[in-house]
Amino acid sequence: MSGEILTVEECYAADRYAAALGTPTLTLMENAGRAIAHEIAARFKPCKAAVLCGPGNNGGDGFVVARLLAGRGFDVRLSLLGALDALKGDAAEMAARWDGAIGPLSGDCIGDATLVVDALFGAGLSRPLDGEAARAAEAMNASDAKIIAVDVPSGLQGDSGKPLGDACVKADVTVTFFRKKPAHVLMPGRALCGETVVADIGIPEAAANVCSLFENGPALWRARYPWPKSDAHKYARGHCVVVSGSMQSTGAARLAARGALRAGAGLVSVASPPDAVAVNAAQLTAIMVKPFAGAKGLADLLSDKRLNAVVAGPGCGVGRATQELVGAILASSAAAVLDADALTSFAGDPKALYLLLRDNAVLTPHEGEFERIFPGVLAHSQSKIEAVRAASAAAKCVVLLKGADTVIAAPDGRAAVNTNAPPTLATAGSGDVLAGIIGGLLAQGMNAFDAALAGTWLHGEAANCFGIGLIAEDIPEMLPRVLQALHSS
């Protein structure tokens, strides 16, 4: 399986596609239940298990799980939300194949079970849990039992990754089918799902061809990664320029520059205002310092076409002067990464920034910066994915919204969610390093979308390699280990 992520409606369409090619939906349901039972049996010895079934197809999967677990020696207690004679279609057929007792769903239906299968509601849920379903969800969360969710934990909406109300199951393991949905990768859904297992239930791979949303990973961009060639020299690997702030705000630029150098750029320079040249020069060795004065000075510097990528924003300061620097950068031919102050400087007139942008630019805001340059977009979107796609279309360039579930989108609608970033990345300067890594990849000729994808994944993997105690300075120093493992795999 690849990294495609399908919306709820696309998953329904995949079921229909399989049925049209001759795989009955009843077979898909049987296969789904079998996959869940297999995952449970692989993790747990036979024990007391409570299977909680809802009134739809998710409940039908639950009936299959109950039957197969009982056949494996589990002591199964099944509870149903609603009346048995109200079940329809495949769910009714699977209920008929269950020869055990069926009790009513209630807040105490878990009893002394050590394992609970949450088969109440799937990803297509459209309203908050209430009544006995809400009480059952609360009971599951309060119990010490291991919770196995079918498709998504009940109460979680499949496309937004957000609970629909106050009641939502927190699972230990979630088993979904064919492909992940947005709720499996977006926060808080990813945390509520626990470990997500994607099971093959017989849907043809071609059903995923409609996909334009992916879980970020090397499979998406490895084939275009700019590995050094045997005859490579530094001038063939690009020259990334990082724009420094004034004397008291130079550290962020140096962090970004180190990220660009470790990402493989052949040359890296810090473009430094006159008052910061001495402090930057004292701190840098392999990275050069290039003095400039104001937007005109930066434009003159970038007239050298060999300087083919620019990172601007970290430590630059907020205001008109930074706006003018951004204008000079985007008037050049260099690929650009705009972060932090380079974005916030346009908070009063974001459309002025949109008019300057071009397709070889990458914007890397966190949520606060995103709101400043795309006001209201996040609040009025169903999901973070939808918001970043809308922002990318408006800006006509790649937009990367940072977070535990970083989302990257291109103007053509392609998008990816990054899931490998550890919480240790919540440290001062880590975003500056990310901007630099992306800049270094742009300097080597990667296109903007691939550079944003690869840079984000490498950034997360470097943090994972270091572990607890990470500070921003450590991230570039972990990149050689990450790149070596990637190159060897």
Image (cartoon, helix red, strand yellow):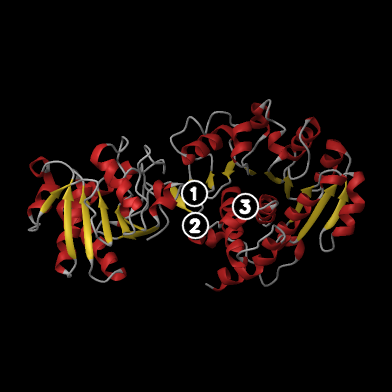
Quadrant of the drawing holding the N terminus: bottom left
Mark identifier at residue 220 = 2
Q: Nearer the viewer, mark 3 or mark 1?
A: 3
| Residue type at tag 3 | Ala
Residue at figure coordinates x 65%, y 56% from the top left? 441
In the rendered structure, which disc, 3 or 1, sits on the residue that comes first in sequence?
Answer: 1
Please, what secondary structure does the residue beneath circle 2 have?
Answer: helix
Residue at figure coordinates x 76%, y 33% from the top left? 323
Give the crowd class for mark 2: few <14, some 14-19, many >=20 residues within 10 Å: some
| Residue type at tag 2 | Leu
Give the crowd class for mark 3: few <14, some 14-19, many >=20 residues within 10 Å: some
* Residue 279 versus residue 387 in the image, above or below: below
Please, what secondary structure does the residue beneath circle 3 have?
Answer: loop
Please, what secondary structure does the residue beneath circle 1 have?
Answer: strand
Residue nearest the viewer, comparing 35 with 450: 35
Residue at figure coordinates x 29%, y 60% from the top left? 200
Residue 119 visible in rendering: yes
Apparent side of residue 450 relative to residue 166 in the rendered image (left or right): right
Discs 3, 2 touching: Cβ within 8 Å: no
Apparent side of residue 210 relative to residue 228 in the rendered image (left or right): left
**Which residue is label 1 attached to?**
416
Apparent side of residue 209 relative to residue 18 in the rendered image (left or right): right
Discs 1, 2 touching: Cβ within 8 Å: yes
In the rendered structure, which disc, 1 or 2, sits on the residue that comes first in sequence?
Answer: 2
Mark identifier at residue 485 = none
Q: Nearer the viewer, mark 3 or mark 2?
A: 3
| Residue type at tag 1 | Ala
